[in-house]
Image (cartoon, rainbow, N blue to C red):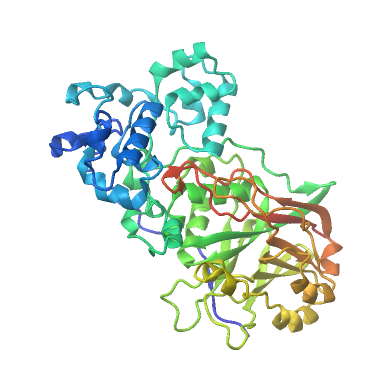
Amino acid sequence: MGQSLGNYNPVHKTPRRSLKNKRQLSAACNFVDLLGPGRVDLNRASEEELMTLHGVDRSLARDIVAYRTRIGGFRKVEDLALVTGVGAARMAQIQSEVFVGEPGSAPNLLSLDLLSCTRVDINRASLGQIQRLAGVTEEVAQGILFHRTTQGPFWRAEELGNIKGVDPALLARLLPQITVGRPRPAPTYSDLRREGLGRPNAATSFHSLREMDMGFLQGSVVPVRPLSQPFSGVHNGRPVLRVASWNLREFGTEKAQNPGVREVICRTLLENGIQLLAVQEVLQEEALEKVCLELEKPSTAGVREWPVDRGTWRYVLMDAPQGEETQEVERVAFLWDCSSGLELLQAVTMETQTEGVSGPHSQPLLGSFKMGDLEFSLINLHLRSDSTARNRQPAEASLDLLKLEPLKPFLQDLFEKALLTLGHLGLSPDASEFAVLREQQLEPLVPADCSTELTRRGGEGEGSLQNIWASHTARDSYTGRWGVIRLGLSSPWIPDGWSWGGIVSTHCPVWVELYMK
């Protein structure tokens, strides 16, 4: 009934050697004009000069000039992609034809912003570094960090004026002390897939970013979220266990290499006291290993500075189907903190694939756990594959109905046990497709009117697609507390198209709480 499973155990790995003689240049330095005479200076070109560029007409040239005026000049060539109408394809065509000089003056080496090397970069500075700026209080520093975390990196230093406590006098005092640095924008592979272009080369994707790729990421990544108080693990004077589910959406090695992704996942687990997580849409086992290693030996400051023990994390993941080992087949997994006393008793794959149905659908994973005297089972489901729906026409995608009937024998066998059926369920819990669960006296713990989705900019989305259903025995241990986590899911290091401050997934983690007997 089961397939062999991958189980994480920490092993000693040879540390990666840093590249020797690798020069790190300040983002403020721009020598493109020396390398390509005859190129168009984006900061000085007229509309007519811009129209000499590949694919730029009068309307687009006017938009470029208007955008340049609004932001006070381009800081680097890649900023051109932020102009409406340019886009990735046109940017690739004209990138070699342009350069960025100093706004309103002829470019020369003497005009380079060498002072930026001694200024504080507000997009990379830690809380302590921001507090050391003259005139900045702790409240203002925390406001800057919070804005950077929730809204993404600052684009101009003047945006500090939007922070509570930063009045015009303080802003004028801060401007000579700060600079605004930004990594090079790059499209994410999820954006390219929607355009039907496939996955780009890993070298051009931010998801493939490693710590050695940019000077300010070497060694460790600066914190991008303030520390919060750890969950006590107690409710009403009794110890509790928090169980959660999270669809991490195309969670593969590339995505897990992004330091912002790792920090958000690890801090979400730690801040919310989650000890057992059901994960959906895992593409590669190495992605889970990177999360466990980040918790064990953090490379991001936000995880390393966590004030209490981070635990010892393990995962269990079903193997890829035979013959599909080299393909990206989405699977489900469990991730848990074994130092809390949580013990995995058994994990098996539930053979529920119906005849005639193929594609990258994950089989459910049944896990049996024990913590103290509390024994319970989880069925981890991904009943609707988003990756399949993206490749279908709308009329075809609507035929991808939930097929819960094959689960019926398992549910009957586990009827008297404490059982949670959880995961990405694809429809609201009041949908008729869940009649099989109701027949076995399972009830959803997250209400149907509660959204579990996010927009790509982190706003509240539509639909209650993630849920946790509990058997009547499991409800005996239920504390009555549940949650949908919407805050802290973005990072300045996660791309959002040609901008930054993206989210880990458009699906929110959901959790419930059980009393330990």
**Camera-side residue: 300 or 279?**
279
Q: Which residue lies furthest to the bottom in this view?
A: 355
Question: Does 177 sit above or below residue 317?
Answer: above
Question: Does 65 sit above or below residue 172?
Answer: below
Q: How many marks?
A: 0
Q: Is residue 416 visible?
A: no
Task: Identify the residue shown where x is 26% and y is 23%.
Answer: 114
**Camera-side residue: 393 or 228?**
393
Quadrant, the N terminus: bottom right
Residue 292 lies, in percent from the top left, at: 52, 57
Q: Residue furthest left?
A: 37
Residue 410 lies, in percent from the top left, at: 74, 81
Q: Determine whether, in the image, residue 466 is placed left or right of residue 110.
A: right
Quadrant, the C terminus: bottom right
Residue 30 lies, in percent from the top left, at: 24, 33
Q: Can residue 28 be seen in this view?
A: yes
Q: Determine whether, in the image, residue 514 is placed left or right of residue 310.
A: right
**Camera-side residue: 213 or 102?**
102
Residue 106 lies, in percent from the top left, at: 19, 24
Task: Identify the residue shown where x is 51% and y is 34%.
Answer: 148
Q: Which residue lies furthest to the front in this view?
A: 58
Indicate the quadrant where residue 406 lies.
Answer: bottom right
Indicate the quadrant where residue 137 lies.
Answer: top right
Task: Identify the residue shown where x is 83% and y is 54%.
Answer: 479
Question: Does 281 sit above or below residue 454?
Answer: below
Indicate the quadrant where residue 371 lies.
Answer: bottom right
Q: Determine whether, in the image, residue 157 is placed left or right of residue 42.
A: right
Question: Does 28 sit above or below residue 1?
Answer: above
